[in-house]
Structure formats: C-alpha cells, structure tokens
Amino acid sequence: MVGNRSWNCSSTFEYLLAPIYGIEMCVALVGNILALLLLVTKEKKNWHMGVVFSCNLVISDIFYALTLPILIDNYSRGRQRTFVHAVEKIELFVFTCNLYVSIYFIMCISVHRYLAIVQPIFMRKHIRPKHAKIISVFVWIFVASISSPLLYFSGVDSDKCFLYANLDVKSSLKSTYRVFMIVIGCFVPFVLTFASYFGVIMAVFKNANITSLQKKKVGLIIGLVCILYTVSFLPYHILQIVNFKLNEDKNTYCYVCNEYQVSKASACLNMCLHPILYMAVSDSIRAVCCRRSSNE
C-alpha cells in the first residue's frame, strides 16, 4: 500500500492474496479467541504479568484480524477502492497500529520471561501484575499516538487508498516519519526481544538442574519464535522502504511490489501462530522458572 505507481504491477498475483488473507483471518480469529478464553479461564487465579501481556497480545491480534476484510475486498476487486476514503484511512491506521502493538507486546513478554528466569528475586520483590496493566495501557496509547500521523499521510491515488500517498505532504517529512516508525516501531523492540531471549537461553543452558532435553526444548521453541519474528516483521519493513523509494523516484519494479505484498501477508501470518508458539513457550518457561525458583 505504499506509493502510487505500483498499480502498473496489478496482476493475477494480487487476486491470490484475497483468499490468503481470508484464510489467515479465519485461523487468526479462531485461534486467538480460543487462546483468550483459555487464558481468562485457566489463568484466572494466577493473573501474573505474563498473562496480562499475553491477553493484550491476543486482543491485538484479534483487532488485527478484523482489519483484513477491507483488504480482502480490495484485492478481490483488483485493489479498486469500494469504501469511502475515511474508512480506508481508518483501516490503514488500525492495521498499522495493531502491527506495532503486537510487536511491543512480544517485546514485553520476552523481557518478562528474561526477568523471571535471570532475576527471579527481583521479580518477586518489585514487580506486580498492576505494573503489567500500567505498561499495557502505555503501549496502546504510545503506539496509537505514533501511528496517528498515518491518517494524514495516507491518500487516494487513481481512486485507490495508499500509505504515504498524500501528495500535499513533503516527501522529506514522509521519509523522516517512515524511518522513525521503523526504528521505534520495529528495530528497538526487535533488539530488546532478541536480547531477552538470548539471556533466557544463556541462563537455561548454564543451569545444571535442568536436563539436556529440557534445554533443547526451550532452545528450539525460542529459536522458532525468533525466526518467526524475523521472517514476519523485518522483510515487511525493509521492502516497505525499498518500494516507497522506488515509487518516490518514479520507478516501478513489479517483483519488488509483489515481494512487498507477500511480506505484508507474512506479517499477518504471525497472528495465526502466536496462540500456538506462545502457549508452548509459556509452558516451557514456566517449568524452568519453577525449577529455578525452587533452587534459589
């Protein structure tokens, strides 16, 4: 959705994205609603920080999935705009906002797991569920605030709604904001997430009380989470920059445009897999936490 010249690349490829988004939406809604029900019922007597962050991640993914019907309609019609401009602007905002909310809550979950394993005494003495609720409210407000300029930067070109297509906005301003969103919205939480999981793996593998099989299990699941994070979010942001730059220079490379659309679909795939991966990680990490805490 970046730029205004990628329409020259419209092809049967884009029509394939409609059923892909449809499948992702159905899987994400079913999986995350079930995950939310399990978290609320199973963990209702143990409402710790991890559960609070996980619930917020699940809610974000549900909202994220609910933005897809407009995308599905657009792609099924060759990306022709069928909704009023305001609706499409809101769809862009909600989609982007929940993308970064999801990234930030993944970061929060990762940091919480790091503290629970590496600094369990500090966690028990100073961290309470109310802190997680305060952080959660801050994340929603912060991400909504930094995403709100999209309502101004997005615009209509050739009867289609695009991100950064408002021609009344200076190109330098759009470029600055785009870099800001990539750094603050993706790069910073990306670094903190990987650093946290690296610390978790180091702590687990140094603990002599944990069996080799348990270490491999934790390492494998955390590795899968990190790979999923990398595949889902980094290509989307890198290709967004490249695609925007090409359109800004009035160049059109269909393979870049198509790869960018695929990267957006892969970002949506993330919300389908969160319920499976994070519940698996939660069970493994909880076992390690209990074992480690009992030996402090």
Image (spheres, rainbow, N blue to C red):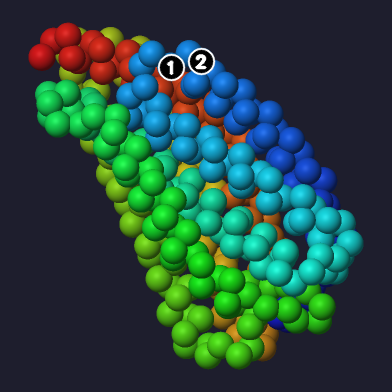
Q: Is residue 50 above or below residue 181?
A: above
Closer-to-camera residue (254/154): 154
* Residue under label 1: 44
Task: Judge from the rendering whether residue 4 lies leftward or rightward of residue 12; answer left or right.
Answer: left
At numbered mark 1, what does the secondary structure look like: helix, strand or loop? loop
Closer-to-camera residue (259/179): 179
Task: Find residue 45 and report its image quarter.
Answer: top left
Question: Residue at the spot x=40%, y=22% of the render?
Answer: 282
Observer able to see residue 86: yes
Q: Position of residue 177 (x, y in %)?
A: 45, 75
* Residue under label 2: 41
Closer-to-camera residue (16/139): 139
Q: Position of residue 212 (x, y in %)?
A: 30, 13
Task: Judge from the rendering whether residue 267 lies leftward or rightward of residue 30; answer left or right.
Answer: left
Label 2 packing within 10 angstroms: few (<14), some (14-19), many (20+):
few
Q: Distance between the Cα atoms at labels 2 and 1?
A: 5 Å
Q: Position of residue 100 (x, y in %)?
A: 48, 54
Quarter that holds the C terminus: top left
Observer able to see residue 253: no
Q: Is residue 192 above or below residue 219?
A: below
Q: Are marks 2 and 1 in contact (CB under 8 Å)?
A: yes
Task: Judge from the rendering whether residue 222 lies leftward or rightward of residue 5; answer left or right.
Answer: left
Question: Residue at the spot x=29%, y=33% of the render?
Answer: 130
